[in-house]
Image: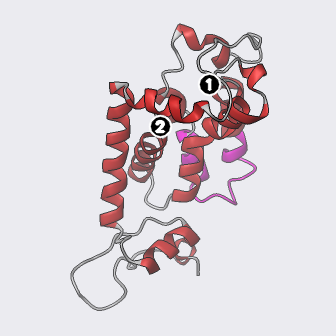
Amino acid sequence: MLVFGHIGLTLGLARALHRQIDARWVAVASMLPDLIDKPLQYVIAPAFTHGNTRTVGHSLTVMLVCMVLVAFPFRRTIRAARVVALLLPCHWLFDSMWKPAERVSLLWPWAGNNFAPAHASGVQAFGANLLSDLYDPVYLLGELGGLLVLGFFWYWCGLGDATRRARLWRTGALLPFRRDHGHGAPGMRGASPAVLGL
C-alpha cells in the first residue's frame, strides 16, 4: 500500500477509536516503516537492503520499540499517545508482512539481514517502482479507500478554508465544521482548550 492508503485508513481508524487524536502524529505513525526504509533503500544503504523497500523499519523489533516509546516516554507529548501506539502495527498489516517472503524483514535482526531482493536500487528506480505498485489491484484499492477517508475528513472538517487547515497543522485536531450558520465558531463547540491549542 502507498501513501494515501496508509494515512487515510489509519487516520479513519484512529478517529473512530478516539475523538481527540492528533492527526499529525497518526500520519507519521502510519508511514513510519517507510520513512525508515525508503531512505535506506534508495539513498543511504541500497547494498544493505538488497534493493528491498521493506527491511529494518518493517521489523517486529522496530515496531515494538516504537510502540513502547510512544505509549510511555512520549505519552505527555503526543495527544492520545496510547491510541497512536496501538495503531502503529497497521502499516505492517496493510503491507502483509506475515507472508513467507517477508520473513527476514519481519524478524530482523534475529533472522539476519539477507533481505529478499525486490526492486532495483537507487533514486532513479523510485518512479518505476511507484508505477508498478499502482498496477497491483490490492494496492490500488487501498489507495482509493484511503483517498475516500481523506476526502471525507476534508469535507467534514471544512478544510477548504485556509484558517481551518492552519489550525489542523498547528493542533492536529480533526474538528467538525458545522454548516448550520448558527452563532459561535463552527465546529469548535465541545472541543477542549488543549485540542484547540489555547
Tell me the kind of residue under disc 1. Answer: Arg
Viewer-closest of 168 and 53 = 53
Residue stretch in magenta: 68-87
Estimate the x, y position of residue 39 in percent, counting from the top left: 70, 37
Question: Which residue is label 2 attached to?
Answer: 2
Q: Where is residue 41 in the image (x, y as percent from the top left)?
A: 69, 29
x, y (%) of residue 137?
32, 26
| Secondary structure type for disc 2 | loop
Q: Which quadrant is the C terminus positioned in?
A: bottom right
Spatial CA span between label 1 and label 2 = 13 Å
Task: Give the answer, above or below, for where 33 lies relative to 193.
Answer: above
Is residue 98 within the magenta segment? no
Taking the view exactly as shown, the residue that stands out farthest to the left is 180
User: Which of 47 and 108 lies nearest the eye of the viewer?
Assistant: 47
Q: Is 71 above or below relative to 45?
A: below
Residue at (30%, 57%) from the top-left corner?
Answer: 152
Q: What residue lies at 64% left-to-right and 21% top-to-bottom?
A: 52
